[in-house]
Image (spheres, rainbow, N blue to C red):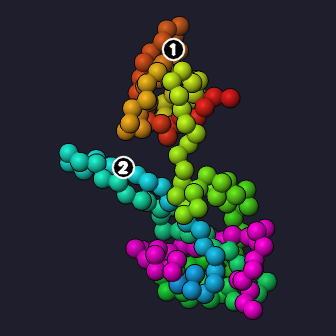
Amino acid sequence: MTCHQNLPDTAPWYLVQTKPNAFRIAERNLLRQDFPVFSPTQNQTKKHGTRFRHTVQQLFPGYLFVRFNPEFPQWRAINATYGVSRLVTFGNIPSPVPHALIAGLRQRCANDGTLLPPEQLNLGDRVRIISGPFADYVATVEQIEPDKRVWILLDILGGQTKTQIQISALQKAG
């Protein structure tokens, strides 16, 4: 039995840097060696000329997470795996990724590793802006467009101002 099989859910995850354009090769070869891997992806829509193109992009380009037991020396094979640039270490010791980070990412992903959209917004919802010049402002959702843009009403200087913002810059206000 190798060190990678039957790992408990509490086993640590580590970060691997892949060689340029070799993510799939590294992933395939790590899986062949029985190392569990995790690389969250997200669906993106980009306008290309007059058309929209749908693509799947890595959430962390050039990196993936790998799980192993550091007490067994077989983990050293990761650095020699085709497609892998290096296991991210501090000194000569691999440093585990915080469990809460991986748990949070896995919770927000579908079974295939695709990042699920944020919680659904509805007209009239109170939302907090989480990025951009109006970060931390609370607004009201007025209109939601299919291209993931949202029209919101901001309370600024005693009046309401209508503005458009990407849905990814919003979260429901608690």
Of callouts 1 and 2, which one flags the residue occurring earlier in the amino acid sequence?
Answer: 2
In this rendering, does residue 135 appear at all? no
The front one of 102 and 55 is: 55
Q: Kindly identify the residue that appears in the image at 44 percent across and 54 percent down.
A: 43
Q: Position of residue 53 (x, y in %)?
A: 30, 53
Q: CA distance from mark 1 to mark 2?
A: 32 Å
Q: Residue at x 68, y 74 (%)?
A: 67
Residue designated by label 2: 45
Q: Nearer the viewer, mark 1 or mark 2?
A: 2
The local crowd at label 2, few if under 14, some if 14 to 19, many if 20 or more residues have their Cα within 10 Å, is: some
Q: Is residue 51 magenta?
A: no
Which three-letter amino acid code belongs to the residue tagged 2?
Answer: Thr
Mark 1 element type: strand
Image coordinates of residue 60 in percent, x first then y, are 52, 61
Tell me if residue 146 can be seen.
yes
User: What is the quadrant of residue 10 in the picture?
Assistant: bottom right
Residue shown at 51% from the left, 14% from the top:
156
Q: Residue 21 falls in which quadrant of the image?
A: bottom left
Q: Is residue 158 left or right of residue 161?
A: right
Residue matched to label 1: 156
Residue in view at x 53 percent, y 28 percent: 122
* First to last magenta residue range: 1-28
| Total count of labels | 2
The location of residue 97, given as percent across then percent down, is 69, 65
Q: List the single residue furthest toward the left.
A: 50
Which quadrant of the view contains residue 171? top right
Q: Residue furthest bottom?
A: 1
Amino acid bearing label 1 = Ile
